[in-house]
Amino acid sequence: MFQIFHQMPTCSHPVFSAQLTPSLALLHSAAFARAMSTRTHGNLADADRIFTNLYGEHDVGVKGAIKRGDWYRTKDLVLKGRDWIIDEIKTSGLRGRGGAGFPSGLKYSFMPTPDRKAPGQPSYLVINADESEPGTCKDREIMRHDPHKLIEGCLIVGSAMYAKAAYIYIRGEFVQEANALEQAVQEAYKEGLIGKNASGTGYDFDVYVHRGAGAYICGEETALIESIEGKQGKPRLKPPFPAQVGLFGCPTTVTNVETVAVCPTILRRGGEWFAGLGRKNNAGTKLFMISGNVNNPCVVEEEMSIPLRELIDRHGGGVIGGWDNLQCVIPGGVSVPLIPKHQCDDAIMDFDGMKDLHSGLGTAGVTVFDKNQDVIAGIARISHFFKHESCGQCTPCREGCAWMWNLMTRFTSGNAELREIDMLDEISRQIEGHTICALGDAAAWPVQGLIRHYRPEMEARIAQHKAALQEQEQTAQA
């Protein structure tokens, strides 16, 4: 970007500056616009990394966290008040890191102020740490290696909502992560960072770790609330929304681990700093997960809007067998449509980049398929996952997920009819948008992506199966 300006004649003399012609000023403006439009993102500088102990190379405890800059002037941040905290988060352009990508500052602003609540009614902050989607494994790294970032974020964000306490709902299978998180919470209490007069702010704030029982559906915010209350983890009808009637009937915000954990750093460094990373409306850094057929599966913090190919080559060690051996990628956890190799060549890893390809960034869990993988069987396995995890409350999801899995199982072997491809697509669209929560959509989209990009392969497999049956019949008759 800067080479454009270096090639232009410049002068710092005040007279010359005052006599700049409109055309030259326009040239400056046009050059800047071109530079911004052609800027590439990625290769995040170490100075811009938020998660400085992502791989557990340093002390996980409170002393190590303080050395790395956590809990620094937390009191000052809290005392700046609700409006300043929420405005800075809005300025940063932070969008939810749990999959939906809703603007975080706007979401937090929905929480009512004390004058808009019943006298004495508490508010709650709930952290969704029920990370259960295949291919998604970022929040667990935060909780076991950088837990104080999350706890500090709970205090600061919670104070902006006038929340009495934070409940961190953690996936039941995350035993090591839950133990590390509970230890960090105890350390924070011992140091006076949370609890009565948290961090010397005069504000009382408690943090509770609640272990789930392993149900994927509890990643949906209202099902999560139901589970904390001791009920079956089934989504609620909305409205009312949690910000109105949430945990224990009180105003509640449910938000993702990574979303809250980045907030203290954003507030210390300023929203403009965070907004300067990534493309417009896709700001900041992001934890990307790279798995599947790559040489170096990993979780890495990178700048938003990094090209997919650079992400895989730089951090994932490249596709096994080389880039030309790539078949397709599921870019955001298994709940988003896949994108084939020809789209991966120029794909941009952010919300808008994935939307342009009729997919989604989701959790940024990148699953790589090389040409040795059976993509039809892969999507069938995903269909089985969603069939198994459906809570059964909504008929389209309960029945439709089972039907999709049954059809996908037959498509895997080719034991199907061509007309059933359209039937499968129709079933997916009868599920999509017709359920209380988004699990139905998540089950439908991988199937729709398969049909969109791999219909010829599905038809070829059906033809092969029929040809094999005919050959068997002829052999038997002979």
Image (spheres, rainbow, N blue to C red):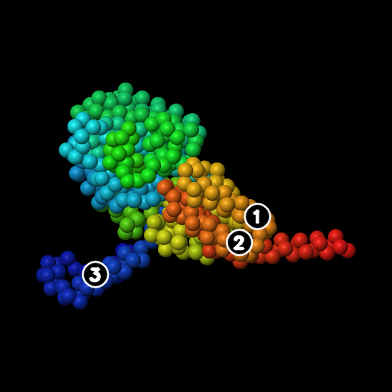
What residue does disc 3 label? 29
Instruction: Examine the rendering and report whether any part of residue 341 can be seen.
Output: no
Q: Image check: 79 left or right of 393?
A: left
Contact, mark 2 vs mark 1 (Cβ under 8 Å): yes
Amino acid on which disc 1 is placed: Arg
Q: CA distance from mark 2 to mark 1?
A: 10 Å
Sequence order check: which comes first, mark 1 or mark 3?
A: 3
Q: Is residue 186 left or right of residue 397?
A: left
Classify mark 3: residues with Cα within 10 Å, few (<14), some (14-19) or many (20+). Answer: few
Indicate which disc, 2 or 1, sits on the residue closer to the N terminus. Answer: 1
- Residue found 32% across the figure and 23% down from its top: 190
Look at discs 3 and 2 and give the one toward the viewer. 2
- The alpha-carbon separation of the residues under discs 3 and 2 comes to 56 Å
* Residue 410 - label: 1
Mark 3 residue type: Ser
Which residue is at a point 39% across and 32% down the rendered structure image?
228
Reading the image, the residue beneath label 2 is 420
Q: Image height check: is 214 above or below 43?
A: above
Q: Position of residue 245 (x, y in %)?
A: 30, 39
Q: Quadrant of the C terminus?
A: bottom right
Q: Amino acid at mark 2?
A: Glu
Label 1 – label 3 distance at C-alpha: 59 Å
State the residue in front, 135 or 457: 457
Q: Is residue 423 above or below residue 103?
A: below
Disc 1 and disc 3 in contact, CB within 8 angstroms: no
